[in-house]
């Protein structure tokens, strides 16, 4: 078991607060020393009470799911002797009203895997790797949202997407 630590800090400043017109901007700090500006999403709290340039919890959660999937995928590919030169994803999380409350209901990952020279995998092998990565990603196992993975690949010897993606 491992503990993972972060610090989340918000300060009121000179705002009255009780009128609900306070800034939702805050700061995330991580144990490695990185500090990230954060805020409520402008989709849920209008500007200027939110900060569009900051990371919001919804997009951070979607990025964390994508990152977890990628790290497990790379681990499994390396164990199988596959050379991966690049992995790029543009995940999308959808927040909808469900059972009377806003809920992250769906996350779609669209990983594009760039294979190294001489590395080939079939669409079925690629799908299996992504399936196994999803099963082993502990973050994915902790969410109720539907997760869809639409992988594609390119190779140095055959630069095209095998699954019809971008």
Image: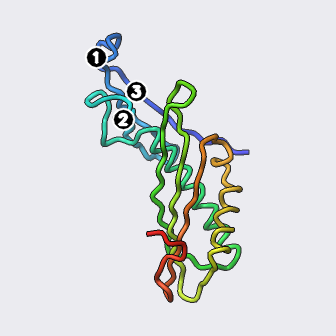
Q: Which residue is mark 3?
A: 10
State which mark lies toward you, 2 or 1: 2
Dot 2: few (<14), some (14–19), or many (≥20) neighbours within 10 Å? few
Quadrant position of residue 115:
bottom right
State which mark lies toward you, 2 or 3: 2
Where is residue 34 shown, x and y percent of the image? 44, 47
Q: Which residue is mark 1?
A: 15
User: From this viewpoint, which residue is outermost toward the right?
Assistant: 1
Q: Which residue is mark 2?
A: 43
Name the image quarter holding the N terminus: top right
Instruction: Assign a secondary structure to mark 1.
Output: loop
Q: Earlier in the sequence, mark 3 or mark 1?
A: 3
Q: CA distance from mark 2 to mark 3?
A: 20 Å
**Mark 2 in CB contact with mark 3 (< 8 angstroms):** no
Instruction: Assign a secondary structure to mark 2.
Output: loop
> Is 57 in front, or is 120?
120
Where is residue 154 shown, x and y percent of the image? 50, 78
Q: CA distance from mark 2 to mark 1?
A: 22 Å
Instruction: Assign a secondary structure to mark 3.
Output: loop
Dot 3: few (<14), some (14–19), or many (≥20) neighbours within 10 Å? few
> Is 17 in front, or is 104?
104
Name the image quarter holding the C terminus: bottom left
Q: Earlier in the sequence, mark 2 or mark 1?
A: 1
Image point (53%, 74%), residue name: 153
Where is residue 151 shown, x and y percent of the image? 55, 66
Image point (64%, 49%), residue name: 140
Per the rendering, the mark at residue 60 is none
Dot 1: few (<14), some (14–19), or many (≥20) neighbours within 10 Å? few
Relative to 36, 80 lies left or right? right
Relative to 66, 3 lies left or right? right
Is 110 drawn above or below residue 1 in the view shown? below
Where is residue 54 shown, x and y percent of the image? 35, 41
């Amino acid at each position: 078991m491992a503990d993972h630590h972060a610090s989340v800090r918000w300060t009121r400043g000179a705002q009255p607060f009780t009128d609900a017109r306070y800034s939702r901007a805050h700061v995330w700090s991580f144990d490695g020393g990185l500090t990230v500006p954060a805020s409520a999403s402008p989709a849920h709290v209008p500007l200027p009470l939110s900060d569009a340039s900051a990371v919001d919890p919804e997009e951070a959660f979607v990025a964390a799911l994508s990152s977890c999937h990628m790290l497990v995928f790379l681990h499994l590919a390396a164990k199988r002797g596959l050379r991966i030169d690049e992995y790029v994803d543009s995940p999308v999380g959808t927040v909808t009203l469900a059972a009377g409350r806003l809920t992250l209901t769906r996350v779609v990952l669209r990983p594009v895997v760039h294979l190294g020279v001489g590395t080939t995998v079939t669409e079925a092998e690629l799908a299996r790797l992504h399936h196994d990565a999803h099963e082993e990603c502990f973050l994915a196992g902790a969410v109720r949202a539907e997760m869809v993975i639409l992988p594609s690949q390119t190779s140095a010897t055959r630069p095209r997407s095998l699954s019809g993606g971008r």
